[in-house]
Image (cartoon, rainbow, N blue to C red):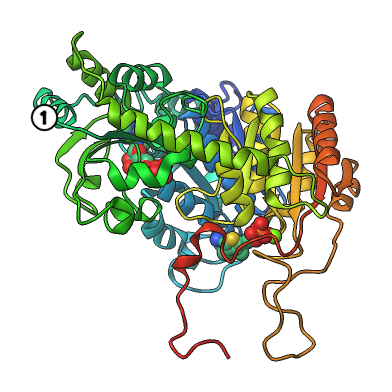
């Protein structure tokens, strides 16, 4: 391209009028580098120094979605990375915008999702002398400890390699968040257009297969063969890996009961006969060999030890993970299998042979009996038509909706709203459940819902605690602006955990966990031209959600939930520290 305006003018003075040298600049190079590497969408907030970059990227055919807060744009990029296996891109302005986006970058890294936070930054010379530039901050140094890798590009000719490095760092090995620092004046730097095009790098095979060692495969098979009560745990690494067929083959050929972690629900349908989801406590306590597939033995699995694992009885672990350092992180791993999940599971299936023996029937029968009993016990509770609604009644309605619309994406956050929905709503397809992830972070809801709709084109049902929703609620405007097929259901119980807490001092402020009573979140959606509905019973809820999903119109349903129905901290109340001198 031949640049018009000042860049061309400079060139003409330098090169003479006869043969004007074609120029490019940092703006164009960055856009070309992203496009060359298949970046289709950028999530961000505009401002100095990246406003024009966003405009030009949009002009060049990249979809650039503007949010109301960078954290939500970052959460959208993070979940886009999870859904697509390509880095989700978030674009922010310097210092405060960068910091707002950084939480999401750390969240992506913690969850092992590929994401790149591209942030404009101020003048290096002024920042490094701490002379007080506009939005001054040493962003590279601050980002470094919070993500997988952090790079800064100083010269236009390095943009190609900088973008390539960021992409490869984000998706190869254990995926994670990468920070890419773009000083404002880099965008305006000019270079020869031909040289510029040559400097771009297309990343070849960004996440190479990692084949496990045959001896490690054999060791793993020996351990599994020796089991009397084996269990498979599928984590969100397994759903991220997008090798759904081989996951199914391994589970079905082995005949071993499996437990899906929250975001691995639906990798196999929750109604699969080998699912041990509803018998979670039993299988964790009693299994003797556990095959971990893309799941970590962190707090969500009680670190692989203690009472919930049936100690003093000991459990042997086989662990499949792409990250070697994950092995022995919490307990001894009897058979570490380091590699990508597709390659590892294919090797295991290959090694199982035709004479593979299913696990002892006493074990699979015991799991099934427990599961059937728990499912039956819940079924009647879910059909209640109580007013005000409790979690069971409201979620029973949503369970039926997802059963009828299995390709919809379920976004879920809150405490009780999260924990009850996770166990009540069955999922039927891979990567359809998006939630708070490894940190249990509130505020991912609207970013996740927006990215899910944009990346997949499928309808989205976001089931949100009223507190959880508030963290990203302003993005209802974004949802309306881009006319996304998102239906938000706010479980409105007047507060965090419960709406019934009282101020211990007896003063006039309400308790710390309590919100304005009977708020009408549905009116927020109406403010931007979307559909708002207020519902008080499960039948109304069902009707409203179906109407929203049929129409595809942005909708917010304010579902009035009994303020007394929830539990402190949902299912993880035991993690709260207790005052030794007791409550006053
Ligand atoms: P969950 O929360 O569902 O238990 P985690 O986030 O704790 O899952 O664990 C996911 C694991 O999957 C991480 O340790 C990560 O390194 C691993 N992982 C991610 N992608 C792959 C892959 N393609 N192959 C192998 N392991 C992977
Ligand atoms: C970034 C702490 C965990 S759950 C929750 C908070 C504030 C809200 C629970 O109330 P909600 O659900 O959403 O109304 P319900 O059904 O139980 O009433 N800040 C961040 N992350 C977390 N996890 C918190 C605070 C928290
Ligand atoms: Mg609440």
- Whole-percent x and y of residue 258? 37, 32
- Whole-percent x and y of residue 253? 30, 16
Question: Residue 173: in sight, yes or no?
Answer: yes
* Residue that extends furthest to the top in the rendered view of this protein: 354
| Residue 306 occupies quadrant | bottom left
Question: Total label count?
Answer: 1
307 with respect to 514 (left or right): left
Q: Which residue is mark 1?
A: 219
Image height of 210 relative to 385, above or below? above
Residue sitting at x 57%, y 68%: 133
Q: Is mark 1 within 8 Å of ligand 1?
A: no
| Residue 344 occupies quadrant | top left
Image quadrant, ligand 2: bottom right
**Of 121 and 418, which appears nearest the observer?**
418
**Of 171 and 501, which appears nearest the observer?**
501
Which quadrant would the C terminus be assigned to in this image? bottom right
* Residue that extends furthest to the left in the rendered view of this protein: 215
- Whole-percent x and y of residue 528? 88, 46
Residue sitting at x 73%, y 71%: 500
Question: Residue 177: in sight, yes or no?
Answer: no
**Of 417 and 91, which appears nearest the observer?**
417
**Of 241 and 50, which appears nearest the observer?**
241
Residue sitting at x 21%, y 24%: 211
- Whole-percent x and y of residue 116? 48, 42
27 with respect to 215 (left or right): right
Which quadrant would the N terminus be assigned to in this image? top right
Residue sitting at x 87%, y 40%: 530
Check disc 1 and report its element: helix, strand or loop: helix
Q: Residues within 10 Å of mark 1 (few under 14, many from 20)?
A: some
């Amino acid at each position: 391209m031949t640049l018009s305006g000042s860049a061309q003018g400079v060139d003409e003075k330098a090169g003479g009028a006869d043969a004007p040298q074609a120029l490019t600049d940092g703006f164009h190079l960055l856009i070309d580098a992203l496009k060359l590497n298949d970046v289709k969408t950028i999530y961000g907030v505009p401002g100095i120094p990246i406003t024009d970059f966003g405009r030009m990227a949009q002009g060049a055919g990249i979809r650039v979605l503007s949010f109301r807060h960078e954290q939500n744009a970052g959460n959208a990029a993070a979940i886009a990375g999870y859904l697509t296996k390509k880095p989700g891109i978030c674009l922010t302005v310097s210092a405060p915008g960068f910091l707002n986006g950084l939480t999401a970058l750390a969240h992506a890294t913690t969850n092992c999702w590929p994401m790149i936070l591209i942030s404009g930054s101020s003048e290096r010379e002024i920042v490094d002398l701490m002379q007080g530039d506009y939005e001054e901050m040493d962003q590279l140094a601050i980002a470094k400890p919070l993500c997988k890798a952090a790079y800064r590009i100083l010269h236009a000719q390095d943009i190609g390699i900088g973008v390539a490095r960021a992409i490869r760092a984000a998706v190869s090995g254990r995926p994670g968040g990468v920070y890419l620092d773009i000083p404002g004046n880099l965008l305006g730097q000019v270079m020869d257009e031909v040289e510029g095009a040559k400097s771009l790098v297309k990343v070849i095979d960004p996440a190479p297969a990692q084949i496990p060692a045959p001896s490690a495969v054999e060791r793993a098979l020996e351990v599994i063969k020796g089991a009397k009560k084996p269990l498979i745990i599928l984590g969100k690494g397994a759903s991220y890996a997008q090798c759904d067929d081989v996951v199914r083959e391994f589970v079905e050929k082995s005949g071993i009961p499996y437990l899906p972690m929250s975001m691995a629900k639906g990798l196999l349908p929750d109604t699969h006969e080998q699912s041990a989801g509803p018998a979670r406590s039993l299988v964790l306590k009693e299994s003797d060999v556990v095959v971990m597939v893309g799941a970590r033995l962190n707090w969500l699995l009680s670190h692989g030890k203690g009472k919930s694992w049936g100690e003093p009885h000991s459990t042997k672990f086989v662990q499949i993970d792409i990250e070697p350092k994950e092995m022995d992180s919490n307990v001894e791993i009897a058979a570490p299998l380091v590699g990508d999940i597709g390659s590892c599971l294919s090797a295991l299936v290959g090694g199982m042979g035709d004479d593979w023996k299913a696990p002892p029937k006493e074990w699979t029968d015991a799991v099934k009996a427990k599961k059937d009993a728990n499912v039956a016990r819940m079924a009647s509770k879910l059909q209640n038509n109580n007013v005000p609604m409790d979690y069971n009644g409201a979620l029973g309605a949503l369970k039926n909706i997802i059963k009828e619309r299995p390709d919809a994406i379920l976004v879920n956050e809150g405490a009780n709203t999260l924990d009850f929905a996770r166990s009540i709503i069955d999922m039927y397809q891979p990567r359809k459940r998006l939630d708070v992830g490894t940190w249990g972070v509130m505020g991912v809801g609207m970013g996740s819902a927006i990215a899910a709709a944009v990346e997949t084109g499928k309808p989205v049902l976001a089931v949100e605690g009223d507190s959880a929703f508030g963290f990203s609620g302003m993005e209802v405007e974004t949802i309306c602006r881009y006319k996304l097929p998102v239906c938000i259901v706010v479980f409105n119980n007047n507060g965090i955990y419960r709406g019934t807490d009282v101020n211990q001092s007896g003063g006039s402020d309400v308790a710390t966990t309590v919100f304005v009573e009977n708020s009408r979140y549905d009116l927020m959606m109406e403010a931007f031209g979307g559909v708002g509905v207020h519902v008080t019973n499960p039948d109304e809820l069902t009707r409203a959600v179906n109407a929203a999903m049929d129409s595809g119109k942005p909708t917010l349903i304010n579902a009035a939930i009994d303020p007394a129905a929830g539990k402190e901290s949902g299912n993880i109340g035991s993690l709260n520290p207790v005052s030794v001198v007791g409550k006053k």
